[in-house]
Image (cartoon, coloured by chain):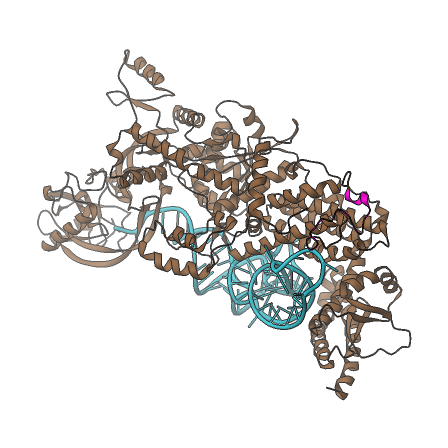
Amino acid sequence: MMEKVYSPVEIEPRLYRRWEAAGYFAAGAGAGPEARGYCIVIPPPNVTGTLHLGHAFQHTIMDALTRAHRMRGDATLWQPGIDHAGIATQMVVERALNAEGAARTDLSREAFLQRVWAWKEQSGGTIGRQMRRLGVSVDWTRERFTMDAGLSHAVLEAFVRLHEEGLIYRGQRLVNWDPSLRTALSDLEVLSSEEDGHLWHLRYPLADGPAPDGTTHLVVATTRPETMLGDTAVAVHPGDERYRHLVGRRVQLPLTGRQIPIIADDYVDASFGTGCVKITPAHDFNDYAIGMRHGLPLINIFTPDARLNEQAPAHLVGLDRFEARTRIEAELGAAGLIERIEPHKLMIPRGDRSGVVIEPYLTDQWYVRIAPLAQPAIAAVQDARVRFVPEGWDKTYFQWMNNIQDWCISRQLWWGHRIPAWYDESGQVYVARSEAEALAQARARHGRDVPLRQDEDVLDTWFSSALWPFSTLGWPERTAELSRFYPTDVLVTGFDIIFFWVARMLMFGLKFTGEVPFRQIYITGLIRDEHGQKMSKSKGNILDPLDIVDGIELPALIAKRTAGLMQPHLAAAIEKATRKQFPNGIAAHGTDALRFTLASIATQSRDISFELGRVAGNRNFCNKLWNAARFVLGALQGRSGSEGAGEGEGEASQAGAAADSDPADGIPAGDAALSAADRWIRSRLGVALAAVDEAWREYRFDFAAGALYEFTWHEFCDWYLEIVKPVLNSDADPGARQAARATLATVLETLLRALHPLMPFITEEIWLRIAPWAGVRGDTIMLAPWPQAAQFPRDPGAEAELGWLMQAVLGIRQIRGEMDIAPSRRLPLLLQQPDAQDLALLGRHQGLLTHLAGLGSVRVLAGGEAAPPAAAALAGQLTLLVPMAGLIEPASELSRLEKRLHKLAQEIARARGKLANDEFVQHAPPEVVTQERERLAEFERARARLERQLEQVRKLGGSGA
RNA sequence: GGGUGCUUAGCUCAGCUGGUAGAGCGUCGCCUUUACACGGCGAAUGUCGCAGGUUCGAGCCCUGCAGCACCCACCA
């Protein structure tokens, strides 16, 4: 007996606990030893984070894939885990320290790392709880963390091997330096955006007095005047007539007492600014390259936190870079060396985590030589050993891979994998798997023991992420998991990390395992709000998936959205908007509704708008399914539909024998006993299942969800359940009733299995009760077999038969609806000129027609009998008449008929136009032409009949209204 | 500067290999029909961004234009 109200909040956590305890999520659960492996590795969420809707979206897809394959009998593994997220995590813990009035540097490295681990223990469980609430079937027993011993071992091994092959090197170069975090960043971690700035036009006096032509100074244009302290040249274009004669001379660099040369370089664009560029090789990537070409010195003027260092004039030393700009502008201005300052838009690079302006900075860093790794990774996608879904993403991938730069992998952080490199006193570096190995190397070199110190730096977090598909399976050991599950099957992720993660996994996977890490890359769209806006804290439009699942009161929602804002002044506006959008907070919708929604919106678009209204719609869908199941169960147990109202004791069935209540071996139903409707719904189920299969093959979860929704609601519930009611409620034909009950059980049971990957909980809850009635055994739907479309072959006869019935019903319903006739009002129906087939169909389905259309009587008009005034509907060749008899205003029927005739006229004109066109008749495929002819004939027949009706009604209208 | 998408009903989006449009939500009308008012039945709404082209035929293919979005990139 099912609860009357569908209550996901009660059902879902209970079932999840059961599943997890039963071990259904374990790698290979339910599969035989011969089963093929199917593996997905989770994109490990950051320890710092909590799951947002984007995660819920991707997890829904991964879980659906995993569940579907588990049901198919594959040995599935959905590998979970968490990423240590070096920078993000260190920032969070530092912030906590700051709040206590302390700083990271007050602690020792070890003490700080202890803090981080402690923090991880305390807050790291959040993600796990969220994932469980979302129903994900990951193998929790295999959960990994990128800083675990095993994965750290993999990182070490990977680093050492790459170094041995010369693919990792250390070098001094200009890097992207984050002065607030005081670490280097890779190119990808720097985001440039256009900002308002200025262009300063500075005068640099010629060093040895005016030139012969009287030139006394050059004017350089710069967006960063403070870097002039590090200038080591002024460059002009070699072909620039204005300056050609000055090349080789020197200018006096203001404020510094230095003289620097005027050089010529093709890089300079003579048409931009003044055509003179100050060259600061230590603080600009372009200038660095020019400096290299011309052998210019590099003068670093900044400390690691971007204050002026001792290279600057004494009175400026220690100034922050932005203060320095102001001061230098003032001093140059006072000296009359500023020609003008104009507003200028320019691209400003900022750290993706800190948001601080990135400084090109000269440091020693570790790099991965990437070209040799990129080549095979490009080839793997080119020859389709790996496929992007949707396909187009390979273009993005190629574009980046073909222009890839060496990867700076060292970070000046504490939280992360320490670089396995040691230095002796002379600075000689030893890369080794352990300090002991490094010592041995040093001993071999020096012939004696020498003291070593380990490199202070850690690796870019993405270095360990790049190993994830195989490090989690035990690499570098040759584990059973590795051989069974690697290469993994599909990677599900967003396009935002194609470069950060996908490309690097491909490169490292191929490098270390010789195989691609995954065969397909399903790139999901980005979840946005209902207006296509990116969800963000500052916009105040974030929806927490769990708030959608379990609901949240308005005050709590407001508090959540306004807490910890970077710009507190936004709070009021966010509160207002939130109150407006969710005056009553957010209702609990349940995981299944959320998941089904996420699946339905998983189109191939790159941006996906998320509307809460859709979740509500799908919550209603769950409710629909729930109630359909209640009905079916009632029918199977032999109760009539009135349970619930009648306190639901109902063990004594009114309509069924005692045997009806026993699900022991399901309900037998010989094919012969199946009614047309039974055969119809089975046929439609087969069609739906085939559509679902195709959708799954193409990762079109939206199509799969759509097909199941359509079948469940609009075929199974709207038609079949209604059709079956009179059969169940009548004792007239026990065989028919038995066939209907068997069909109800089988169709619902099968449907639940098809729905399960998308809505795991409600399907399980219902299935456990329904399955025995369908003769299916099992402890869980999770391990029940995937439904086979072939088991429900198409039945064209039944579909045609029901098509006739439905057309007739719809025609009558339209009359009822258009004429505002209450459903309770039984209508008399007259049939005009039925042919033999109509009569046969009517003979079989008169009861159903009566039931579905709410008829009071059905009568065939005799040959010469004149029809009374009536509203008409068409079903095939048949005309259905509902006598007006005071129920229907002739005027209403008149306008209804006119409307329909108008439409028909349009269709007829269109079809005639086509067929009148010889080109069409000659060139179009014959079947298309035939189809068009048939359509036209059909339209014309319908029109003729409706016109006759129209005439009849007109006569009435003329006399009356 | 290079690249990639997008522009279809009031809103958010589908639309497979070209045969002239669909869904969900919303709207309107009728209905306490015994699984479900988180419901039932019925209805309305689109020169498919614009302009050309290919084709017997284009929302779907090609070209151009406009608008929007995103990615990459070293113009001071």
The location of residue A709, given as percent across then percent down, is 64, 53
Report how many numbered discs are placed on residues in the image.
0
Relative side of A793 to A563, left or right: right
Instruction: Name which quarter of the figure residue A658 lies in.
Output: top right
On the image, which quarter does residue A842 sit in?
bottom right
Residue nearest the observer in this picture, A694 or A850: A850
Range shown magenta: A643-661
Q: Position of residue A89 (x, y in %)?
A: 36, 38
Tell me where residue A58 appears, x and y as whole percent. 52, 44
Tell me which secondary structure the magenta stretch mostly adopts: loop
Q: Which residue, as the protein is rendered here, is positioned at the far right?
A: A863
Is A934 above or below relative to A239?
below
Q: Which residue is drawn at 38% across and 32% down?
A: A368
Residue at horizontal 76 percent and vertical 41 percent from the top = A663
Relative side of A862 to A393, left or right: right
Q: Does the magenta stretch include residue A174?
A: no
In the rendered image, the quadrant that contains the C terminus of chain A is bottom right
In the rendered image, the vertical position of residue A552 relative to residue A88, given as above or below: below
Query: Horizontally, is A58 left or right of A777 in the view?
Result: left
Classify residue A845 as left or right of residue A822: right
In the picture, which chain is cyan?
Answer: B
Residue A875 % position (x, y): 79, 67
Q: Is residue A655 one of those drawn in magenta? A: yes
Asked whether the viewer can see residue A346, the reply is yes
Q: Which of A892 and A172 is in front in this view?
A: A892
Examine the rendering and report whether any part of residue A456 can be seen: no
The color chain A is rendered in: brown
**Residue at the limit of the structure toward the left, as seen here:** A209
